[in-house]
Structure formats: C-alpha cells, structure tokens
Amino acid sequence: MIAGIGLRSGTSEADILACLTQALAAAGVGSERLGRIATLASRFSEPGLVAAARTHQVELVAIPDEALAGFEAACATRSTRIAGLYGVGSVAEAAALAAAGPGAVLVQPRIATSRVTCALARSAEPDKNAL
C-alpha cells in the first residue's frame, strides 16, 4: 500500500500522521500494510513528512512535479487550485498512483484536512506482507 501525501510547507508530523491514520482507517487497512509514502519532489524534504515516514519506518518517494499530470485521468477527486498549479486534480492521489507503479489501483481517494491530503493506492505487484 502506498500513501500519497500533499501538504503545505511547514506542516507538522502530527498533522501528517493524523491524516494518514484517517485514510488508512477509511480504507480498512492497518498501518503495517503501508509500504511507502510518496509526495511531490518539491515537498520531499519537508521535516514533518520525513519524520512521518521515519515513524512508520517506510521509504519516502519523491515524484517529479511534472510527472503528476500523467495521472489526471486516474484521479477520483479534483481541486481546481491544485490543477492550476500541478496539472492534476489531486497531488495525493497522483503521487500514490505514480509511486505504486504500472497497473496501480486507487484504494482510498484523498482525504483532506486543513494542511494535508492523503490518498492510498495499491501496487499491482504481489504484496510481500500478505499472509
């Protein structure tokens, strides 16, 4: 399971973790299934995001901002403001799908809080954590 995160600069680890927890719960997925967190390359080194990835002990993946537009058709939600900035309706959804690889499926459309968005995608690759 890949979490895509969109966030405002300076967002705290606590705010990111709260949104991520909410998305996982909405999808009925335990945090142990989380394999990676993906975000815009321009947000990759945000301290709160780096700390959230460390807390979950998962890899943080940077998606080039310009690569998000290729996932517009697969996004379930659309923010006009974000579409104007990045060419895609949801940074969180596009980042999750991009990081999950070819054939990825959006499992949880974006959940938005005041500073963070989070969406979940499942990789088409076999899940090594499945029983």
Image (cartoon, rainbow, N blue to C red):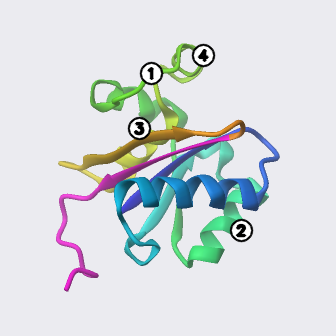
Q: Quadrant of residue 126?
A: bottom left
Seen at 71% across and 39% down, the residue is 115
Seen at 34% across and 30% down, the residue is 75
Which of the numbered marks, if any, corresponds to residue 3? none
In the image, residue 102 above or below residue 126? above
Seen at 44% across and 60% down, the residue is 25
Query: How far apart are the two marked residues, 4 and 1, measured between alpha carbons?
Result: 9 Å
Which residue is under mark 2? Answer: 51
State which tag comes first along the sequence, 3 or 4: 4
Query: How far apart are the two marked residues, 1 and 2, measured between alpha carbons?
Result: 28 Å
Which residue is under mark 1? Answer: 78
User: Is 76 colored magenta in this rendering?
Assistant: no
Which residue is under mark 3? Answer: 94
Q: Residues within 10 Å of mark 3 (few under 14, many from 20)?
A: many
Seen at 46% across and 72% down, the residue is 31
Locate residue 54, reporting x and y percent. 64, 75
Which residue is under mark 4? Answer: 81
Locate residue 36, reporting x and y percent. 45, 65
Q: Is residue 61 visible to us here?
A: no
Q: Amino acid at mark 4?
A: Arg
